Image (cartoon, grey):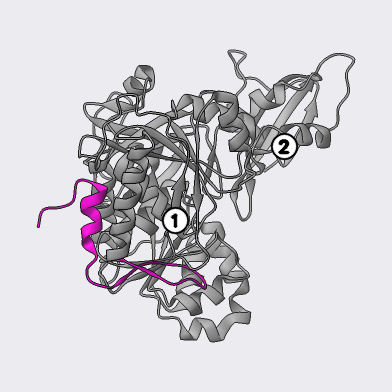
Amino acid sequence: MPDPVTLWELLAGGSGESPAISAPGREPLDFVGLRRHVESTVNALNGLGIGRNDRVAIVLPNGPEMASAFISVGCAATAAPLNPAYRQPEYEFYLADLNTKALLLEAGSDSSARAAAAALGIPVLELHVGDEAPAGTFELAGDNFGGGGSEGGLAEAGDIALILHTSGTTSRPKIVPLSHPNVCASAGNIQRTLRLTAADRCLNVMPLFHIHGLMAAVLAPLGVGASIFCTPGFNALRFFTWLDEARPTFYTAVPTMHQAILSRAPRNRDAIERAALRFIRSASASLPPQVMAELEETFGAPVVEAYAMTEAAHQMTCNPLPPAARKPGTVGIAAGPEVSVMDEAGAHLSADEVGEIVICGENVSDGYENNPTANAEAFTDGWFRTGDQGRMDPEGYVTITGRLKEIINRGGEKISPREIDEAILDHPAVRQVVAFAMPHPKLGEEVAAAAVLREGMEVTPREIQAFAAERLADFKVPRKILIMDDIPKGPTGKLQRIGMAEKLGLT
């Protein structure tokens, strides 16, 4: 059977009455039921005037309905999951930037996305979940607003399945369209790397508005007929209860989650002894070798670290499972796309030479939407430049030595510093501001900012934080703000984010 090239074809991986989606305290949904539900939702969306390549923003809490809504919307149109923690100004930006056709919300939700959609004249579709409904099933309700030329039926291989924003060093986040072949190829890469079979079950604790959870915890398992157990989101206090209920063979998470789990492991020895994890996966941020070793000792299972990004529909490299060698401190070997290291001129470097990590393959996006400048900078001879500096050893294991970009990586959440700059600069007392990363013992990096006030005006760091919190999601609000007479500048007079924490004594 050929590899799937659409989400609908990917769902053929499950057979019979095997469970597909389950959740705490819910009746599971088998693969037959999941395919019927997806078909029903595609028909419902078509009936409401939504068809292939129309953008449907999804703002739902983590859980089985978010998982099935992502798949169902992707089979009919283009899924655009957004972070439920955003504020109204953020929603207005993302909804407008995506040219959103409709917004999908829980019935009765008071999300500020509703007000943002109203401000932009975007129709809202409501998701209704019955009291006894199996996990992942729902009904859609909304006014038919006309197709406007939309083409109905199941999405085809040339269509865009998923569209996400990725933070960049410019003030405007870039739009990453991922086609059906992109996401299906990525799911296949993950399946092969992890040797997934229908006997596997994933305990998902990752947010499902992020490429990590959508690919590694949802599409990859479902594509081989494996089961996914959808939690309401990461909670270290409940993790071990879910571990007992779900009986998973693996879970995938960011390093900060792994560390939180380890902190509660001593008081949950019984649950750990009952667990039968085949492996543990880590991605989205660097996993300290010490944490990897502690996880393996605690759970008696191998830990594999992957290197991934949105533009690659997630996975690029991964440390392989035993009996192959795992090298702590590296992000493993090429795990799907081709991987190389390139110098600034575009020449491929030899083993152990340091340069920019580049990739090419079926899972890699064709380019950013409506951004020819970014595409010209990102692609060299068909290779995508990741913006990460690193080297590859003679055996093909990749080590990341630093980031060329200025993105703040707060525990796996990638944050554009200029977005923070612009929010704080709206404060009438602030004349100049620069956001930057400062080291954090658990998150890896935390958000900090330095600000210069307007002459004769006063404001405290706490007041600036409160102001920013009205405009930014909580994880983007600087935890440290310095009020300064002047911010250190480079030789050309530019503010330099990289190295700012060290210059200001925050390391």
Q: Amino acid at mark 1?
A: Phe
Is residue 2 placed above or below 371 in the rendered structure? below
Circle 2 sits in a helix, a strand or a loop, which is it? helix
Q: Which residue is mark 1?
A: 138
Where residue 114 appears, x then y in whole percent? 59, 36
Is residue 350 in the magenta section? no
Figure quadrant of the C terminus: top right
User: Bounds of the magenta span?
Assistant: 1-30
Q: Earlier in the sequence, mark 1 or mark 2?
A: 1
Residue density around tag 1, few if under 14, some if 14–19, many if 20 or more, within 10 Å: many
196 with respect to 462 (left or right): left
Residue toward you, 344 or 319? 319
Which label number is shown at residue 221? none
229 with respect to 118 (left or right): left
Q: Which residue is mark 2?
A: 469
Residue at 47 percent across and 85 percent down: it is 274
